[in-house]
Amino acid sequence: MKVIICVAMLCAVFTGCGMGNTPVASLHEEEWFSPILNAYAVFELSNYTVHDDEIMGNTFWSAHMLLSPDWNEGNRPPFLYALHDLNGDGVPELMIGGEYAPRYGLSSNIFGIYALQNNSPTSVFNQTGSRYNLSVQLDDEGNCILSNSWGHLGTSEDYFYKIDEDGQLVLLNYFQCGVVFNELNEATAEKQHYRHVGDEFVRITEEECLYFMRKYGSSGHLGQSELLEQEERTIQLEWSLVEVQW
């Protein structure tokens, strides 16, 4: 039996950050990412059993599939992909995503990001932790920022990254926020904010934390939009289905 794997779009319009025009991805650019797209198509086709670590990288599934006995039961999100120029060099990056799957701890609909490094598609970011939400934000200078946030029981973490001109992931800032508990171990309305500087966390004020949230167009995991006095600048990606045909 011959298996033919087809990607839904051969020529896709993609947008980018810090760009005056909206370029059109050529067939050649689509072909650059075809190993990634085909690997995800085979993974879905194989009932989530054939995972190509070398091509796909350390994904959520490679990290948790063997640890989650119920992963092979129930509904699985079909894989989607989007092209977006994240560093303004005129060449799109590839994002793999799907519908939300909270049953499996996936809060984000962006699972992985792949960039061309030396003309080779390479994994630069994969969502491997549960309860994280990855989104693409527009900062106050019109650049793409990756916001990855997490929270649990009153504690939150917010990571901000960019993709540089070499297709490498660069950490810009990392914040932690936690509620203050009283002597009865009850949560209060007070919060403590920390920024990671060097090898340590430095206590900062709420306003200092909000300054960076405004800068990166994010409201953070805690959704502090009412304190930011601005709307989130989240980029809505154009998703296409990764299709498989026998």
Image: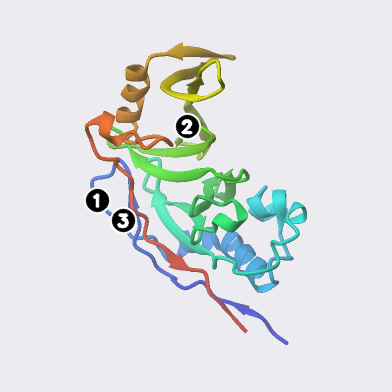
**Helix, strand or loop status at disc 3:** loop
Residue 19 visible:
yes
Residue 102: percent from the left, percent from the top?
55, 55
Residues marked 3 and 1 touching at CB (< 8 Å): yes
Q: Is residue 200 above or below residue 38?
A: above
Residues marked 3 and 2 touching at CB (< 8 Å): no
**Helix, strand or loop status at disc 1:** loop
Question: Which residue is drawn at the image coordinates 51% and 50% (left, top)?
Answer: 107
Q: Which residue is denoted by mark 2 in the rendering?
A: 158
Residue 88 visible:
no
Residue in the foreground of this view, choosing between 154 and 214: 154
Number of the front mark, 2 or 1:
2
Q: Quadrant of residue 141?
A: top left
- Which kind of residue does numbered mark 2 sit on? Asp
Q: Classify 10 Å Cα crowding around label 1: few (below 14), some (14-19), many (20 and above).
A: few
**Which quadrant: the N terminus?**
bottom right
Q: Which residue is denoted by mark 3 in the rendering?
A: 23
Between the residue at mark 3 and the residue at mark 1, the CA separation in whole angstroms equals: 6 Å
Residue 232: percent from the left, percent from the top?
29, 40
Residue in the foreground of this view, choosing between 207 and 146: 207
Q: Which residue is denoted by mark 1 in the rendering?
A: 21
